[in-house]
Image: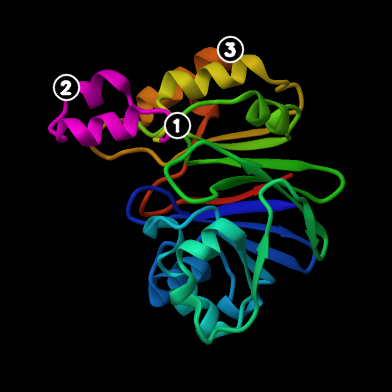
């Protein structure tokens, strides 16, 4: 199994997971042409995707999904709550499938386990994706860590983990106060120290890759995110990967 990012941040998100002939794209917040260019950078054709998995209905995650699915005939999977929130966008498009946020399912060689999370969306999820030998945990949009999240991510072989903001930078920054409250709230986004705290509360003994994702350009830096996560793991900061908005990150093997 291997995985790579098309890009991560408030301007668009997309993560590819592949095992054998099965290839899923988690979210697509990019326009069709942009997504195709980003896939080509990874050596992939748009019509080679098995499915698109959606986490929730915010535009930086689902914005490009309807047009991409219609253009290339790629099936889409999302929670029933997410689909109810955006049903008009998928009218006339075939291959749209709903699932309950607590039900696992298989797509080819991959086992998909949704993780219900606290976020300001209808029925938001994150994912653990496995191939029977390795497990990748993807956690990029949630306000607080729950016991359920900890249980799902414990023992993963790789983690793509939200480090959206540094709290002091957010508090001192130029964002309006209501937006600051939303970001830092229980239904908002994880800050660096919260992400680091998660690592101290789960089994990381199998961890081969750790990528900090969904970093705010205004309220965080790669150096701060790396330092927080490295401190929790007791590893060198350079070992922590960064999913950037423009480049994402290249293929990682499991």
Residue under the image location 45 percent in, 58 percent down: 57
Label 3, label 1: how many angstroms apart (C-alpha)?
Answer: 25 Å
Q: Nearer the viewer, mark 3 or mark 1?
A: 1
**Vertical placement of residue 116 versus 206, above or below:** below
Q: Is residue 207 visible?
A: no
Mark earlier in primary sequence (3, 2):
2
Q: Quadrant of residue 226?
A: top left
Q: Nearer the viewer, mark 3 or mark 2?
A: 2
Image location (x, y in percent) of residue 26: 58, 57
- The residue labelled by disc 3 is 234
First to last magenta residue range: 166-187
Residue under the image location 16 percent in, 35 percent down: 175
Q: Nearer the viewer, mark 2 or mark 1?
A: 1
Q: Main secondary structure of the magenta part?
A: helix
- The residue labelled by disc 2 is 172
The quarter of the rendered structure image containing the C terminus is top right
Q: Is residue 39 magenta?
A: no
- The residue labelled by disc 1 is 143
Residue under the image location 45 percent in, 51 percent down: 248
């Amino acid at each position: 199994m291997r995985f790579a990012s098309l890009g991560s941040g408030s301007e668009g998100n997309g993560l590819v997971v592949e095992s054998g002939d099965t290839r899923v794209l988690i979210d697509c917040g990019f326009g069709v042409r942009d997504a195709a260019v980003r896939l080509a950078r990874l050596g992939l054709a748009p019509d080679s995707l098995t499915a698109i998995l959606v986490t929730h209905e915010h535009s930086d995650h689902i914005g490009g999904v309807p047009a991409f699915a219609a253009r290339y005939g790629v099936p889409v999977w999302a929670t029933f709550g997410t689909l109810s929130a955006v049903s008009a966008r998928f009218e006339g498009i075939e291959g749209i499938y709903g699932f309950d946020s607590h039900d696992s399912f298989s797509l080819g060689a991959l086992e998909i386990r949704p993780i219900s999370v606290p976020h300001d969306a209808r029925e938001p999820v994150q994912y653990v994706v496995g191939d029977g030998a390795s497990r990748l945990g993807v956690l990029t949009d949630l306000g607080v860590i729950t016991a359920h999240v900890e249980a799902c991510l414990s023992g993963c072989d790789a983690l793509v983990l939200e480090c959206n903001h540094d709290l002091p930078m957010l508090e001192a920054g130029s964002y309006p106060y209501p937006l600051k409250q939303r970001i830092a709230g229980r239904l908002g986004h994880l800050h660096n120290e919260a992400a680091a705290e998660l690592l101290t509360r789960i089994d990381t003994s199998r961890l081969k890759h750790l990528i900090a994702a969904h970093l705010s350009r205004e309220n965080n830096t790669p150096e701060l995110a790396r330092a927080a996560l490295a401190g929790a793991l007791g590893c060198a900061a350079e070992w922590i990967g960064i999913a950037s908005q423009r480049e994402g990150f290249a293929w990682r093997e499991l």
